[in-house]
Every structure is written in structure tokens, then in C-alpha cells.
Amino acid sequence: MSLLRLEALSKKFGDHWALKEIDFSIDEGEIVGLVGPNGAGKTTLFNLITCRHRATSGRVFFANKETTSYKPHEIQKLGISRTFQSSRPFAKMRTLDNVMVARVFGGEFHLFAQSTDIDSARQLLELVGLAHKEQTPAGDLTLSEQRRLDLARALATQPRLLLLDEVVAGFSPVAVKQAVDLVRRVRQRGVTLFIIDHFLSLSLRVSDRLLALDHGEKVAEGRPQEVMRNREVVRAYLGTRHEDESQSA
Amino acid sequence: MQTKGTTRQQAIQQQIAWAAPTLGLVLLLLLPAFARYNDYVLQVFTHALLLATLALAWNILGVSGSISLGHAAFFGAGAYTSALLSLDLGISPWATIPLGGVLAAGIAAIMGLFCLRLRGAYFALATLAFVEIPKVITDNWDGLTRGSLGLVGLPGLPSLQLGSYHFDLSASLVGSYYFVLAYGLVLLGLVTFVFRSNLGLALQAIREEEVAAEAVGIQVQRYRLLSLLLSAFFSGITGACYGHLIRYLEPGLVYGLHFSAIPMIFAICGGRFTILGPALAALVLYPVDQFIFHPLLPAGHEFLYGAVIILAILFMPSGVWGQVRKAHFVSIKTGSVE
């Protein structure tokens, strides 16, 4: 039984098809990498799944409900959270309050913060390694810390499906390795993950499957090693060899 | 790792954060004793307190990141509603003042319909333009509002009888002063409640990063509307109190740019990310304006406000009180910490 299912999902911006007829599904508990060069439509796909943008055509199903035209807060309530390509912290608020917001509004609303909310917010900061920064305004955190805060905030809403948009872009090899561990720990909490990863440094190591896009179209899906050997994918990333072109001509 | 210097600085800031408001409150409570024989001082501080409540009310919306230049619409609507109901129908001001708040919130609902889809400068400009609607209606509906003639002879605030104590709130300047101070403290309590609750958390999150706020499940427009309605309700109540204290109204006066701009100026100078900042700025800047700049420059004394807002924006974007509170922006209580 798939947790997320996309049926012929398309998005047109002006005359340009950002996504064209994408069929795909993700099972509960999977880690799926979404790869492709710049402009392939990866972030657009996330924006459609989280209902930030409305699909031009096609349908999205999540947990057996059609969610194509939900509002962002509704899809969030149903169990989809995301991080952003450029992290978006609540800059003037303390790091702990950043997670508290997500905890309070992603879960059951109380007028005042419950001690259980505070405890679980602290646990999440512990998980992403920011416990010692809980009193720091989020805007003062480093790039990698802000990305981890984004992740803690997304987890605080207790999602079933978590969409990570370029969490490791610009990370050092050590930080990438830490992110790999972190993603595995998130999966152990029972969260299904869909990961955008332009440079494949994270998704090749953790993904069960990959979905490759190019110019808004699905070019391959399957096990990471198979997808990476796929001619279309190689061409999208590296271009075409001169001999290949002359052979096909 | 914190160095000793910053820890010490934080400790001093913490002390200021407690000492300044406490001292201010004691001074405000004792002021009539000092100023018993000086009506002018008492009048100035009564008006400063009233403007402080307007700034506090303005900042209920301000904390969500929306800069309103249209709060005169709520101030004027509250003033006129309460004045007309008490003047023409003879209803007690105790009943008509809250009704002024309700009508102001009603006008805010209409304003929200048009303006809340806008952000930043566009929102500010739309609210600035919106004030003209209630102003023109009040100015021209002669049968109801007596138009540009204005209203005179508004009933003052009724006396309060508590046991054997008799509080004269209208004839006695001291009585009026304490009434406005009491209202200010009640409003301050409510604003603290709102800002420290999860509602306040949502408003701040919307201000900081609207897209992320939506992504964690906050219904952004619903909370923006709620903060606008609350803000307008209390601005309307302040306007109504103003009418019963001054006892005459004119459309050009209560719907004027003055009552739109002044709460914004106080909030930005004082610190619009703080609870107390807007009120503190009102209590300092208005008396400074009246006691120092008005005698010096009777025609252009309000240049003070222009000057302080430019200085605040350039050198203290989070306001004076925001500077003192530093990293301690309004945040929820978290057990042992702080």
C-alpha cells in the first residue's frame, strides 16, 4: 500500500511545463531520493505535494485521500512536512521557540505551551545536535545549523512523510556523513522520507530508490545503482558524448 | 561558550528589564501626588497613557509584522460610536465604550477583507487609504453624526462608587488619570497574555517567515485577521475613552493622520517585537514633546516624532526596549530557563 501516489501530475508556468505527467508512488517506510539537474522540476514537485502550488493537471493521493487541492496547513495536518532549499528560520525567535511553533501548530493546539511540548522540542534539538543552542536566536545560527533546525522543526509536526529539499547542499564531507546518520535515525522513528539531492551525496548513500527527473519529465526510477547507470540520467547530468551523438545520428 | 563580559552584560540587561518598568509604574502611581497642583502635568500624562494604550493595541497587529497606517479608522469609529450612543440615546458610557470597540472591530473586518492579502508597504498604504472611508462617511452623514460640525458636550465618564469610596472620573483630573492608568494596566496584561500564548508564537512566526509558518501548520490569514480584530477592538475602546475624556469630537481630529501615525511611531521607537516597548515610548516621548519641544517650537514641535523615528530606524531597528531585551524577544515560558 503506497503512502504517497502521484498520478499524471503536471505543472505549467506560463508556456513552460515545469512538470509533465509524473506517475510515481512511495511506500510507507521508504527513503526515496529525487535527483536531476537544475530546473528538472524537483522543488516544483515538492511544492505540488505540499500544496504550495496547485497542479495544472493530475492528482496527488496521500494516505488514501486525494490531496491535490488541499491547503498547505491541511496537508501538514494530514502528515506531510518539509524543509526548504534555502532554510527559512524564524530568525528573531529563539531556536527552541522555532521548534515549539511547529510542535504546537503541527499537533494539537493549546493556548499555552505544554511541558510535554517543550520536552519533545528539546528532544528534537538533541537529535539534530542543537541542544546547546536552544536560547540562541535562530538567525544567528550557521547555515548547517539552520538546516538542522529546519529538520527539527519539520519533525516536530510529527509527519508521516518528510520532504527534504537539498539539506546537505554546501555541506562539508563530515557534515554530509552526519546528515546520513541523521536521516537514518529519522527513518527509525517511522518517518518516510523523500529527499531532493542535486549532487547525490546524501541520496546515493541512504535511498532505497531514486526518481530521476529532467526537464520536468520522469527519466528513470528504481534502485540507486540502476538509475545511476541509466543512459538518460547520465546524459542529463553529464551531457552526451560526441561519439554517442554521431552513432545515433 | 559565553565570555564573562557578555554574561555580565546580559545580567545588567535583565536587571534593567525588571527595574525600569517597576520604577516607571511606581512613578506613574505616585504622579498625582507630585503633580496635584499642576493640572497641565496631569493632563499631559493622562493623554500619554491614552496614547500608550493605543500603541499597545496597535502592536497586537504590529507583532505579526503588519505595519498599519490606518488605526485612526478604529480610533475614530470607537470614539464616534460611543459618543453618539451616549449622547443621543443616553446610554451609560460604561456600555457604549465596549460597543465602540465592537464597531471598530467590525470596520477592521471590512478592512481585513481588502488589505490582509497585501504585505509590507502595500498593506501600510492600503490601510492609510482605508481611513478615508469611515472619515468621509462621518463627515457627510449629517443626520447621524452632525458631520463636520463635530460633537460637543459628550457625557464624561460616570463616577464610580466602591463601598464608601467615591471616584470622580470626569470632573477630577486625578480620577481621569487613574482611570486611564487602570485601563492601560489591564490592556498591558491582556497583551502580555496574547504575546506569551501560542497565539503570540504564531503571530511572531508569521512575521519572521510566512511560508515556513504555513508549512508547520499555522493558518496564516486566520491569525492575521484575529490580530487585526483584537488590535482594532482595543484601539476603538481607546478612541471611545478619548471622546469621553476630551468631551468633543470632530471627524478631522479623530480620523486624522495623527492617530494613525503616532502608535506606529511609539511602537517602532519603543520596540515592536516587545510587549512593553510601545507603551514606554509613549510615556517618554509624548511628555518630552509637550514639556520641552512644544514651548520651544509651538508650530513645529512634532518634528520630534519625525526625528526619533528616523534615528530609531537607522540605529535601533528593534527599538529602544528591543535593544535592552536583546535576545529575549517575546518568548514562551520554558520551565527552568530564564
Image: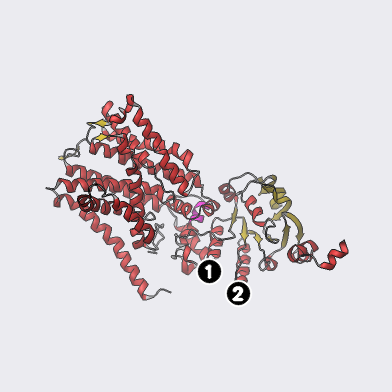
Q: Nearer the viewer, residue A46 or A155?
A: A46
> Which kind of residue does numbered mark 1 sit on?
Gly
Secondary structure category for the residue under label 2? helix
**Apparent side of residue A176 relative to residue B247 in the rendered image (left or right):** right
Quarter of the image with the C terminus of chain A in it: bottom right
> Which kind of residue does numbered mark 2 sit on?
Val
Residue A41 at x, y percent in the picture: 68, 55
What is the chain letter for disc 1?
A: A
Residue A233 at x, y percent in the picture: 76, 62
Find residue A129 and name its label: 1
Determine if the magenta segment contains residue A35. Answer: no
Residue beneath the point at 17% across and 46% down: B40
Span of residues in magenta:
A101-106
Q: Nearer the viewer, residue A141 or A182?
A: A141
What is the chain letter for disc 2?
A: A
Residue highlighted by disc 2: A174
Determine if the magenta segment contains residue A104. Answer: yes
The disc, 2 or 1, on the residue closer to the chain's N-terminal end is 1
Residue B296 visible at all: yes
